[in-house]
Image (cartoon, helix red, strand yellow):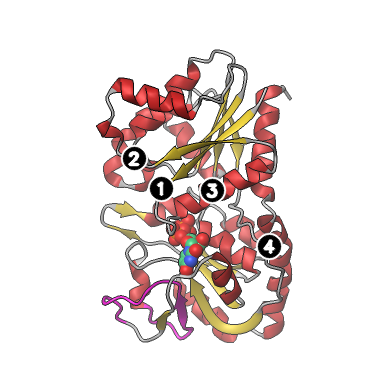
Amino acid sequence: MRTHITNIYGHSPKSTALIAQNMTTNIAKSLDFNEIGIYAYPVSLDSPQELRTRIDGMISGVGFTDIVVAQFPTWNDMEFDESLIARLREYSSLKLCIFVHDVLPLMFEENYGLMPRFIAMCNQAQVVILPTEAMKARLVSEGLQGPKIIIQKLWDHQTTLSYQTPKFERLIHFAGNPDRFPFINQWRYQTPLQVFDQPNDNSLTDNASFIGWYRDEEMLFKLSSGFGLSWSENFPGKRERDYSELNLSFKLSTYLAAGIPVIVRRGIAVADFIATNHLGLVVDSLQEADDIIQTMSESDYQVMATHVKQISFLVKNGYYTKKALIDSLHSLLSTD
Ligand SMILES: O=c1ccn([C@@H]2O[C@H](COP(=O)(O)OP(=O)(O)O)[C@@H](O)[C@H]2O)c(=O)[nH]1
């Protein structure tokens, strides 16, 4: 019996979906999983037979009694994901876990109609890894039933960079782009915002500096002071804020890996975890965060940083992913 995990290729190196799946695969490999590579391509060009042949090539190393963890979505269209699951289900003794990174029907309003297909796909697995309890409740209300559910809880952000005590600075970092997070173009708070993205013509503020996109280690190195912001707003067609109440943010774990305290909106899925573990500020508005930072003492900051250091160790070493994968294997192979 062998264990396998799918992994995507061929997307932009700046794609967070690619970064997250590649990282998850690296962690799984440390647990002796084999990789099933899935290259990005337009699935609509394949005839049903070509698609089947393509999938057979990808899973040629999978045996009838093996375990497969499918990281979804593959971003090759839901038709591809469904075909992959259908083909794997033909191996009657194979055990299947779907590791849900994003739920397309909830990400984009126009995709909500895909929900029944998404749920039907998940219901074919024995185990489904979901990001949060809130996502579990939502998908159960949409019809998810049957698979054992494992909660991921937090993204990891693996790095070998050694821990540095962060400096107290009244500064907020944001590792996201203004197309998805337009509110950063109107930053009007006293605490300056430092954005990891190229300058853009739509920025209406002098108090946000766009310092460019950095590769992983450089970015982590620059996140050496102040706070990391994870914040989403709804805008037409994309209910980012609603989605953040169900899903996990990757950038949140980037800040934790770097060792800096975070700022999150009350109501997002991990807000309680952030508050209970004293990892930063859980606030109702950006104005509230600004006010707290402007009056905060250095010792208050360092207390938070000390708490972050502990979770940073877990995140940098991949322990959330390892736990989710190991719990999934136990669920697939034993009964409690
Ligand atoms: O200069 C940068 C800016 C961002 N990122 C990566 O992009 C992620 C944030 O992407 P996104 O906003 O899509 O993530 P989300 O928080 O929405 O999951 C960060 O965590 C980093 O891994 C990076 O590598 N370099």
Q: State the separation of the CA atoms marked 3 and 2.
A: 17 Å
Residue at (30, 78) in percent of width and height: 203
Q: State the separation of the CA atoms marked 1 and 4.
A: 25 Å
Tag 1 near tag 2, CB within 8 Å: yes
Tag 1 near tag 4, CB within 8 Å: no
| Sequence-wise first label, 3 or 4 | 3
Q: What residue type is labelled 4?
A: Thr
Q: Which of 87 and 139 is in front in this view?
A: 87
Q: Position of residue 315 (x, y in %)?
A: 66, 56
Q: Position of residue 138 (x, y in %)?
A: 46, 39
Chain part drawn in magenta? 187-204
Residue 133 location, quadrant: top right
Residue at (71, 76) in percent of width and height: 165
Q: Main secondary structure of the magenta part?
A: loop
Q: What element carries label 2?
A: loop
Q: Residue furthest top?
A: 92
**Which residue is labeled 1 in the image?**
10
Q: Is residue 189 visible?
A: yes
Closer to the observer: label 1 or label 4? Answer: 1
